Image (spheres, grey):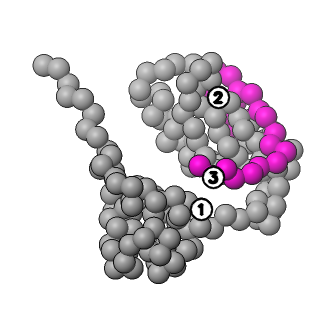
Amino acid sequence: MSSSPNPAPPYASLDDTDRAILAELAADGRLPNNALAERVGVAPSTCLARTRALHGCGAIRGFHAEVDPAAMGLPLQALISVRLSAHDRAVVAAFRARSVRLPGMVAVFHVAGADDYVLHVRAASADALRDFVLDHLAVDPAVQHTQTSLIFEQARGLG
């Protein structure tokens, strides 16, 4: 018996208005509904219903404040490339599940290429970053190799 193909995500059939709402909220998540409705050219009630539907289907994952990491005492940021020692689904899934819970973790990217993951982390200092790698990655039996790149500057793109 062959397995069925993965179903399309619930937001695969979004229209231009839905995409416009998403683009405006990605640029400014605090945009009031009335202003959002005006920008995308729909009635406020329609905009609110669509925004709720976009959130309900997972197209909008959440709302958050973009805070300067230095203000939280974590001025050092790094991207850590991780190569796993094995690539079966259980190892990959377990590494992902562990890594998202590590202290200072901003984002976990499963990538193609020589490395398997890129981890975006924040730390209080170079010593804290070194300790993070030694305490959480170097001792992980699933991790074969890491390479750390410091982030000097970060700018948000338009996406």
Distance from Cα at disc 2 to Cα at disc 3: 27 Å
> Residue at (45%, 67%) from the top-left corner?
40
User: Which is nearer the eye, 141 or 87?
Assistant: 87
Residue occupied by mark 1 = 27
Residue 109 x/y as whole percent: 57, 38
Residue assigned mark 2: 82
In percent of width and height, residue 38 lies at: 47, 75
Picture coordinates of residue 51, whole percent (x, y) = 39, 68
**Residue at the outermost front position:** 41
Q: Residue at x 82, y 48 (%)?
A: 153
Magenta stretch holds residue 36? no
Q: Residues within 10 Å of mark 3 (few under 14, many from 20)?
A: few
Neighbours of disc 2 within 10 Å: few (<14), some (14-19), many (20+):
many
| Magenta stretch in the rendered image | 134-159
State whether residue 142 appears in this view: no
Mark 3 and mark 1: Cα distance apart in space: 7 Å
Relative to 95, residue 47 above or below: below
Q: Amino acid at mark 2?
A: Val
Between circles 2 and 3, the one closer to the viewer is: 3
Label number found at residue 92: none
Residue for badge 3: 158
